[in-house]
């Protein structure tokens, strides 16, 4: 792992300094503007038409005003305190937000390929275009995993680049497919429309994209390419599960039950999956650690060892991923509690899903403490990261499949 | 820890205070924290695997007497309220307090004191340190300026020790506040939860349309508790809205709060949008039938052609005086959306209309459960297949089987036609040719509609009557009760809750998230630049320390070292 990343001058300029800072402020302003529209705008928030509220003239006005205000504030603030221009948060977040804008553009392009309105029927959703984009995403993610594994055995920079670029492609395909699905849900009937985070199939795609994106961010910053073989293999396993879900008819867009018709869902669910995704990456780092540990103890092939991050670095990477996931998961759980308080009258009911979220949280909490306290070292912690992810998987899959409760939206029927 | 090691670690217990101090130290130790978190996680699993708060009889049947007794005495059926689970939580609070008590003063002191100097001995132990030998540079101020320019937004402190000039730079100096906030936030949340459990309540109330209630009921361990609210809630009306697929889209109740005999507030509530009155939140939780008025037509099967009516209500029983049959009405639904497509085909949802559900008992009859639909079954091609029912011989909902009665009983004339047909058929006395049957049907038609007169769609009617002839005589019941009219009343299922600890929990939650962000994303970074003249030039040492996130710091430290090297090289030329 070398200290600096060689990047072309244009991207460097784009993603730091004034440009990044102002853009970051504009994005934040636009988000605040949209939130303000949902809260205070005429007609306020409408579950059944929120996407079009954002995309309408009204949304443009609110979002645009917010963006301009954000930019203005940023100019003032950065004149008063120039050191703000180096703010890490702007530099770290701006590429993500840019990427999101790109996804929106992609989704808009895909929307051109949608079948004619007369061809669209709720009963047979197989001709919708998002399904095809998702299929492409599946293929690309699996291809990426294979390339990452190939890279381990043939550490050739071309293979490595192919692996990375296909992972990026997968993220953009998946993200834009989800956005397109949001649009598609309105095509049947405005009443049915809702954000694409309402069933297991949709959140799975979200999970792949978030996991891959978090991994790619770490890869870019810390040159940890060997870890990709593990993370993307996890993603591919998920892809197979998603394909199976599709094959048993769980991929259809279905209307929302009353309990889920809330703006809380749009915040709570994605935030949760930021947590899950980071834990998946931590698991990948843990597996890489254990793999390297085995290689070392067997005096394994030096070529592979040469491209692997060191044990200490892998340990740090796992920690880094948990450090992203733990606060996100904490916030998501609190948001869930707030939603429950509003919808059901109690912020905590010991419902199985809630309880398992608590269990996951406790497991990673104890992981963090174990790191600080003496006596627990690399290998044990790597196992902890792997086991923690198994618990996480049970929390978001097993609970839906085996235990009953309020979160039955994910039930496999 | 092995027992021996444990004993070795124990201080000699000469006095109670030293024992107490020992316990206090153990309580605030990190290993106890880890153990507590893991134990809490494992304990929580039990409550999700064993369904909580079910009927005791169900548990007994599921586990058998021995395990039932074991589980019950451990309180596993209402696990999260058992003394032992609460004790673990109590321990967690104690442990948190102990560890805050021990660490906070130290941390506050550390955050305030920033020693600029570092001894050479200490320098050896730094994980990050590197040095330059600068020849031909003597300007300490320029070196310091270059250092400070590279570290925008850092705080600096300098010290002079003989010829040794030290500059200390700090960033994220308040990082330990993250620790303090996170750990006190957990305490705050637990206190908030305790306040809610002790001073709050949460229970259910079912209010039929048009009536009012002020009592909630809730589970209290294995029993049901009751509580009276200081106001009445009246349900004026209840609506359900459906998606085209038949899935419910919205439940809405119009409620009026009556306080001290006066109507103080009228408002709609839906799921996710509760009503707030006098510290109590009122939520839309469920709904059901609130005693709808039901009119059944009883078709007497004794050949008398008689049709009588029974007017009753859901949840009531109705006894037929002639036959002794008792109908217990259990439920009514105005919409019954079913998938009519064949298995494997694309789904076709259709509303089959209103249906009433009742249990029928009578002398010499096996009790059955029946769902009787008001409308005849019209298939997707528009063909009327006559009235129908769902019948469960076991009384279990899973055993419902659709039964086509043949006749469309919404038209009394078909009931007449059926009897006329039966009469003519029996006149045939055993002759069973197709021709004879047709002849009998024609005669029946003439009887009912007049010579040669045929109503529209009589072919379908013929099919239905044939079906009825095969079907109806098989039914063992003296009467056939069919839903004929209704006036629907819903009840709305409300949940009423008050939680004075809730805001405390939200404050704790905010502190927790805020603290976590400080803790993880604003690590305390310390850098020292130590400048010391040597051999006509300067030895400059850069040393660094960080309390977490070494990956980034490592990278940044080396970046800084490279860049400063260039800066310093510029100074000497
Ligand atoms: C539910 C309970 C708790 C939660 C969620 C929690 C959370 C955390 C987190 C996230 C960290 C940061 C770890 C890191 O540096 O990566 C931490 C550190 C720490 N925790 Fe806890 N903790 C809890 C209970 C406790 C208890 C009971 C103790 C006392 C024994 C304790 C003592 C500590 C200590 C000493 C540190 C290290 C602080 C430092 O040096 O920065 N924690 N805790």
Image (tube, coloured by chain):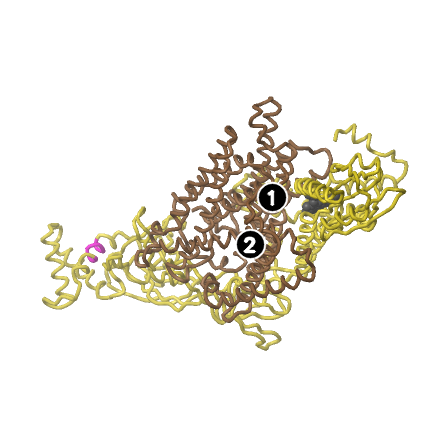
Chain colours: A brown, B yellow
The reply to whether residue B98 is in sight is yes
For label 2, the residue is A268
Front residue of this view, candidates B248 and A334? A334
Badge 1 or badge 2: first in the primary sequence:
2
Residue B141 locus on image (x, y percent): 81, 49
Question: At numbered mark 1, what does the secondary structure look like: helix, strand or loop?
Answer: helix
Q: Nearer the viewer, mark 1 or mark 2?
A: 2
For label 1, the residue is A360
Which SS type dominates the magenta stretch? helix
Magenta span of residues: B464-469
Crowding at label 2, few (<14), some or many (≥20) Cα neighbours within 10 Å?
many
- Chain ID at mark 1: A
**Mark 1–mark 2 distance (CA, rounded to whole Å):** 16 Å
Front residue of this view, candidates B308 and A328? A328
Front residue of this view, candidates B45 and B157? B157
Residue A213 locus on image (x, y percent): 53, 45
């Amino acid at each position: 792992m070398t200290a600096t990343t060689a990047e072309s001058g244009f991207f460097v300029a784009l993603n730091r300094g004034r440009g990044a800072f102002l853009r970051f402020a504009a994005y934040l302003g636009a988000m605040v503007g949209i939130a303000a529209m949902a809260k205070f705008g005429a007609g306020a928030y409408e579950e059944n038409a929120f996407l079009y509220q954002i995309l309408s003239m009204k949304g443009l006005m609110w979002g645009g005003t917010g963006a301009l205000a954000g930019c203005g504030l940023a100019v003032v603030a950065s004149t008063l305190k120039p050191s703000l221009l180096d703010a890490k948060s702007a530099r770290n977040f701006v590429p993500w937000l840019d990427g999101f804008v790109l996804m929106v553009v992609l989704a808009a392009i895909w929307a051109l390929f949608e079948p004619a309105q007369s061809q669209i029927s709720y009963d047979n959703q197989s001709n919708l275009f998002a399904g095809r984009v998702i299929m492409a995403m599946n293929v690309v993610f699996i291809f990426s995993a294979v390339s990452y594994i190939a890279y381990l055995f043939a550490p050739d920079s071309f293979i490595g680049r192919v692996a990375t670029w296909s992972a990026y492609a997968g993220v953009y395909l998946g993200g834009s497919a989800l956005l397109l699905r949001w649009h598609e849900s309105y095509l049947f009937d405005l009443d049915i429309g809702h954000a694409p985070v309402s069933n297991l199939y949709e959140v799975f795609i979200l999970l792949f994209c978030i996991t891959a994106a978090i991994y790619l961010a770490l890869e870019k910053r810390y040159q940890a390419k060997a870890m990709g073989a593990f993370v993307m293999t996890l993603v591919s396993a998920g892809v197979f599960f998603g394909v199976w879900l599709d094959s048993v008819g769980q991929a259809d867009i279905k209307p929302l039950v009353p309990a889920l018709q809330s703006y809380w869902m749009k915040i709570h669910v994605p935030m949760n999956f930021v947590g899950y995704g980071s834990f998946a990456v931590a698991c990948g780092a843990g597996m890489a650690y254990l793999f390297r540990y085995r290689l070392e103890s067997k005096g394994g092939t030096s070529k592979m060892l040469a491209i692997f991050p060191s044990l200490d670095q892998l340990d740090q990477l796992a920690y880094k991923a948990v450090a992203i996931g733990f606060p996100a998961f904490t916030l998501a759980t609190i948001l869930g509690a707030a939603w429950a308080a509003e919808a059901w009258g109690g912020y905590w009911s010991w419902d199985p899903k809630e309880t398992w979220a608590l269990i996951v949280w406790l497991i990673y909490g104890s992981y963090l403490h174990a790191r600080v306290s003496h006596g627990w070292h690399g290998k044990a912690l790597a196992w902890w990261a792997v086991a923690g992810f198994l618990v996480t998987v049970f929390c978001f899959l097993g609970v839906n499949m085996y235990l009953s409760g309020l979160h039955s939206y994910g039930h496999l029927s | 820890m092995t027992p021996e090691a444990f004993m070795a670690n124990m201080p000699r217990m000469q006095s109670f205070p030293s024992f107490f101090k020992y316990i206090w130290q153990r309580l605030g130790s990190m290993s106890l924290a880890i153990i507590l978190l893991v134990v809490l996680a494992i304990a929580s699993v039990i409550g999700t695997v064993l369904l909580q708060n079910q009927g005791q009889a169900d548990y007994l049947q599921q586990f058998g007497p021995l395990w039932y007794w074991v589980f019950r005495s451990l309180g596993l059926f209402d696990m999260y309220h058992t003394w032992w689970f609460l004790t673990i939580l109590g321990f967690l609070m104690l442990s948190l307090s102990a560890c805050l008590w021990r660490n906070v003063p130290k941390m506050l002191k550390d955050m305030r004191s920033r020693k600029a100097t570092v001894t050479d001995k200490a320098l050896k132990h730094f994980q990050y340190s590197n040095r330059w030998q600068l020849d031909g540079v003597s300007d300490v101020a320029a070196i310091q300026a270059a250092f400070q320019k590279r570290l925008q937004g850092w705080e600096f402190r300098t010290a002079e020790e003989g010829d040794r000039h030290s500059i200390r730079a700090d960033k994220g100096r308040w990082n330990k506040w993250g620790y303090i906030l996170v750990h006190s936030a957990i305490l705050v949340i637990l206190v908030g939860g305790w306040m809610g459990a002790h001073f709050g309540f949460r229970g259910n109330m079912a209010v039929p349309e048009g009536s009012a209630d002020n009592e909630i009921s809730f589970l209290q361990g294995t029993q049901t508790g009751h509580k009276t609210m200081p106001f009445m809630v009246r349900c004026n009306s209840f609506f359900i809205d459906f998606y085209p697929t038949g899935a419910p889209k919205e439940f809405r109740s119009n409620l009026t709060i009556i306080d001290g005999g006066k109507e103080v507030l009228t408002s709609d509530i839906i799921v996710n949008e509760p009503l707030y009155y006098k510290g109590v939140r009122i939520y839309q939780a469920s709904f059901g039938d609130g005693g709808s008025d039901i009119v059944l037509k009883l078709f007497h099967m004794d050949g008398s052609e008689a049709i009588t009516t029974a007017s009753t209500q859901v949840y009531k029983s109705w006894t037929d005086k002639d036959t002794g049959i008792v109908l217990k009405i259990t439920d009514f639904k105005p919409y019954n959306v079913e998938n009519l497509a064949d298995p494997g085909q694309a789904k076709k949802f259709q509303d089959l209309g209103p249906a009433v559900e009742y249990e029928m008992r009578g002398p010499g009859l096996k009790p059955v459960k029946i769902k009787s639909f008001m409308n005849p079954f019209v298939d997707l091609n528009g063909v009327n297949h006559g009235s129908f029912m769902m019948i469960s011989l076991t009384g279990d909902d899973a055993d419902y089987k659709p039964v086509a009665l043949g006749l469309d009983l919404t038209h009394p004339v078909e009931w007449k036609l059926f009897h006329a047909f039966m009469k003519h058929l029996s006149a045939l006395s055993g002759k069973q040719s197709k021709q004879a049957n047709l002849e009998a049907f024609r005669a029946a038609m003439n009887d009912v509609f007049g010579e040669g007169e045929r109503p529209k769609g009589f072919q379908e009617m013929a099919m239905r009557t044939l079906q009825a002839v095969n079907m109806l005589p098989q039914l063992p019941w003296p009467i056939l009760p069919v839903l004929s009219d209704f006036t629907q009343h819903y009840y709305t299922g409300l949940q009423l809750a008050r939680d004075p600890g809730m805001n405390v929990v939200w404050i704790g939650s905010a502190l927790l998230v805020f603290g976590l962000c400080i803790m993880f994303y604003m690590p305390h970074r310390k850098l020292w630049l130590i400048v010391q003249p040597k051999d006509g030039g300067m030895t400059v040492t850069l040393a660094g320390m960080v309390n977490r996130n070494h990956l980034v710091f490592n990278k940044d430290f080396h970046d800084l070292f490279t860049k400063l090297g260039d800066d310093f090289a510029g100074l000497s030329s």
